[in-house]
């Protein structure tokens, strides 16, 4: 068996060799025996895929983003800004087969890697658009039930994907009862500014939770009146019981974080009832 330190050194050497050939704004793929990952630089990972299970959500933040299911467990239409390796798209295609999914990606070279990441060809329920995400959101045709915002460049969040006007357009792009989900970097100095803009655009119906992995936070912003927000303990219990048998991701973790952030007075026994031995 190879010494773990030697394996790590080999991995780092191979990764540096691969990334050193990369040009600015050009994605590159790093391949191991079991994994495939997409990068723009040595500092961050855009996407990770298990070769043996291409539809699996490997990165924790993508698992947390699926928390939109608590607000809308059967969305008719989902749109995602930022394709990457297509992890969320592939997962939704497999586990939400009746949902139409549109992925909007501005970088043609990212789209060109779709075959390597097993992203399926366009069909009646799925399409990839080569377009500017902000322009797509500004268009008020083809409203959606869920918006997944996961667009980054080498400097972090592009300005046109985190402005007050962008979040206003996201609100208008959603049908009533819809939810916007945004992947945020906890270290971003403008983190508070972005979440304040979301609260202004979505009438303060916003909850932000820590992602499954360190460094990311996920914002859920709800559009609509009535009982959809804040989500009740009773509704959450019903949905977690219905969803968990069908989804191989730790949805109970996201549910607990959402309820805690909403300051619900939930006792330990109620959590045990909801999540049982998973606590």
Image (cartoon, rainbow, N blue to C red):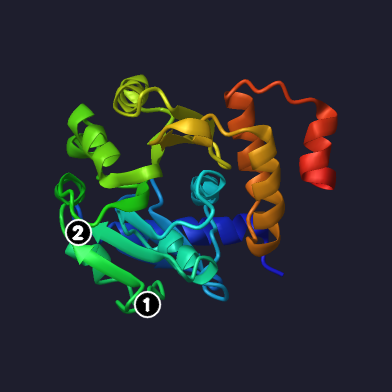
Tell me if residue 87 can be seen: yes
For the N terminus, the quadrant is bottom right
Q: Which mark is residue 48?
A: none
- Nearer-the-camera pick, 46 or 80: 80
Q: Which mark is residue 120?
A: 1
For the C terminus, the quadrant is top right
What residue sits 53% from the left and 59% below the top? 57
What residue sits 29% from the left and 70% below the top? 127
Q: Which mark is residue 107?
A: 2
Q: Residue 100, how many percent across, how many down?
A: 37, 66
What residue sits 37% from the left and 77% below the top? 120
Q: Residue 189, how many percent across, how many down?
A: 34, 22
- Nearer-the-camera pick, 211 or 48: 211
Q: Dots 2 and 1: beta carbons under 8 Å?
A: no
At mark 1, the secondary structure is loop
Q: Quadrant of residue 165?
A: top left
At mark 2, the secondary structure is loop
Q: Residue 8, how many percent across, how many down?
A: 56, 56
- Nearer-the-camera pick, 24 or 6: 24
Q: CA distance from mark 2 to mark 1?
A: 18 Å
Q: Can you name the residue that lies furthest to the front here?
A: 226
What residue sits 56% from the left and 71% below the top? 34
Q: Residue 69, how many percent across, how many down?
A: 53, 50
Eye-nearest disc, 2 or 1: 1
Q: Quadrant of residue 220?
A: top left
Asked if 277 appears above or below 267 in the picture, the reply is: below
Give the crowd class for mark 1: few <14, some 14-19, many >=20 residues within 10 Å: some
129 vs 63, left or right, is: left
Asked if 195 appears above or below 108 in the picture, the reply is: above
Tell me if residue 155 can be seen: no
Mark 2 vs 1, N-terminal side: 2
């Amino acid at each position: 068996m190879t010494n773990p330190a030697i394996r790590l050194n080999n991995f780092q050497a191979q990764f540096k060799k691969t990334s050193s050939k990369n040009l600015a704004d050009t994605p590159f793929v790093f391949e191991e025996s079991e994994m495939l990952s997409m990068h723009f630089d040595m500092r961050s990972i855009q996407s990770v895929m298990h070769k043996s299970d291409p539809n699996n959500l490997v990165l924790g933040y993508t698992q947390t983003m699926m928390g939109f299911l608590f607000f809308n467990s059967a969305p008719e239409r989902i749109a995602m800004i930022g394709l990457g390796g297509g992890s969320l798209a592939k997962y939704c295609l497999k586990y939400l087969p009746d949902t139409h999914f549109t992925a909007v990606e501005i970088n043609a070279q990212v789209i060109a890697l779709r075959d390597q990441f097993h992203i399926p060809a366009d069909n009646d329920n799925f399409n990839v658009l080569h377009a500017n995400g902000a322009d797509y959101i500004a268009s008020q045709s083809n409203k959606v039930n869920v918006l997944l915002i996961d667009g980054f460049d080498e400097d972090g969040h592009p300005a046109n994907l985190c402005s007050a006007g962008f979040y206003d357009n996201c609100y208008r792009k959603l049908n009533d009862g819809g939810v916007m989900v945004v992947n945020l970097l906890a270290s971003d100095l403008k983190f508070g500014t972005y979440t304040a803009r979301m609260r202004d655009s979505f009438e303060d119906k916003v909850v932000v939770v820590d992602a499954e992995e360190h460094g990311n936070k996920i914002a859920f912003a709800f559009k609509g009146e009535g009982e959809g927000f804040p989500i009740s303990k009773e509704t959450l219990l019903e949905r977690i019981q219905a969803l968990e048998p069908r989804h191989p991701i730790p949805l109970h973790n996201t549910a607990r974080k959402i309820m805690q952030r909403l300051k619900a007075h939930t006792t330990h026994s109620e959590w045990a009832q909801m999540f049982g031995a998973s606590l």
